Structure formats: structure tokens, C-alpha cells
Amino acid sequence: MSATGENWPSIGFYQGLSAASQREVSTPGLEGILELGIVRRGQVLTWADSAGNAEGAPSFFPDLTAWECSDSSFHLEDFVPVDAATVNDAPVIDEADQRTLLLYGLNFTLRFARLVHGLDEPTAVRCIIGANETNATFRFHQVREGEHWNPPDLDRYQQDRLIVASICPSGT
């Protein structure tokens, strides 16, 4: 099977973690982000409280996907308690804490899927969770033909650990 998951069996997003265990792998800050929700503004999806001006999208970005990724991105370590040492004025997150951040990011994605399924106009959305020795991020974008934020070959990433999940509601 490829690292991109092209030949992986399809499973539902809500399978895998029970509701009880999902709450255990969350924080009040992450819950607050989910409570904000997402909205469609013109051709883009964004957090409901985003200050981003979607009307001019993609503005200086190469495409709408890059705009959405930039606007939706946040650092998981700002919301998940992990030990980040500082070496030469840069944060350093060990591998165990990187895995913790990925776990919280994956759980956030599973819960975020409900927001996507709740949109008035169904659309496929891709979530990208990335962790490395300095930070971990979550971002999302609509799936568009010919546009992507990350190269599909995840094996190209040597320093980052990535989880890429596509949420495809019925009708998309």
C-alpha cells in the first residue's frame, strides 16, 4: 500500500474512537475551536471567526487551496500540554510529544468531520496534521481538482510526520 493511502480500505470517520475516548484526547482550547465552527465565504471555507478576507482569495496565494490552508492553520502545541524545551532560541519537541500532538490532531480531525458533514452545501475537505521537532499544525482545505497543499507522496517528508485525511460527505 502506498503512503498516500490510495489502496487503503475505506472506513468511516466516526469509527475507531468512542465518544468517551474522544473527549479524553481533547482540551478546552481545541473544544473551543470546534465550537466556533466553519462557514463558507464565497469559494472558500474558513473558521467562523476568521478575520481573513475570503472575497479577495486567493490574493497573493497561488490558489484557493493555499489561501484556505493559511487561514485555517493553527499550532496544536498552543492547545495541547507538551514539554517543549528551548535550544538556541528555538522550541524542541521530542518524538513522544510529537506523537501526542498527532493523536490530538487526529482526534480533532475526527470531530471536525462533523462540521464538514453539517455544511449546507456538501464539499470534500482535506485535513493535514503535521508534527516535527519544533511544532505541530492542523489545517484544512476543500478538495479541488488540480490543487493541493502538500505533495501527494508523503514519503517525501523526511522531517515532518503527517496525517492527511479526506472527509467526503455524501453527495460530493
Image (cartoon, helix red, strand yellow):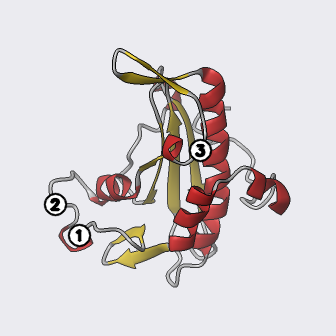
Residue 10 seen by the camera: yes
Identity of the residue drawn at 46% across and 33% down: 135
Cα gap from disc 2 to disc 1, whole angstroms:
9 Å
Q: Quadrant of residue 114?
A: bottom right
Q: Is residue 24 left or right of residue 127?
A: right
Q: Is residue 77 above or below residue 30?
A: above
Could you tell me residue 66's position as x and y percent?
31, 52
Disc number placed over residue 80 in the picture, else none = 3
Identify the image quadrant of residue 14: bottom right
Which amino acid type corresponds to the residue marked 1 in the rendered image? Asn
SS at circle 3: loop
The reply to whether residue 18 is in sight is no
Say which quadrant the N terminus sits in: top right
Q: Is residue 41 left or right of residue 169?
A: left
Q: CA distance from mark 2 to mark 3?
A: 32 Å
Q: Earlier in the sequence, mark 2 or mark 1?
A: 1
Few, some or many residues within 10 Å of mark 3 (<14, 14–19, 20+): some
Mark 2 or 1: the one toward you:
1
Residue at figure coordinates x 35%, y 68% from the top left: 50
Q: Nearer the viewer, mark 1 or mark 3?
A: 3
N-term mark: 2 or 3:
2
Q: Specify few, some or many for label 1: CA neighbours under 10 Å numbering under 14, 14-19, or 20 or more.
A: few
**What is the number of the mark on residue 59?**
2
Residue drawn where x is 61% and y is 40% of the image: 81
Residue identifier under label 1: 53
- Classify mark 2: helix, strand or loop: loop
Q: Secondary structure at mark 1?
A: loop
Viewer-proximal residue among 122 and 76 = 76
CB under 8 Å between discs 2 and 1: yes
Residue mark closest to the camera, 2 vs 3: 3
- Residue 81 badge: none
**Residue type indicated by callout 3:** Val
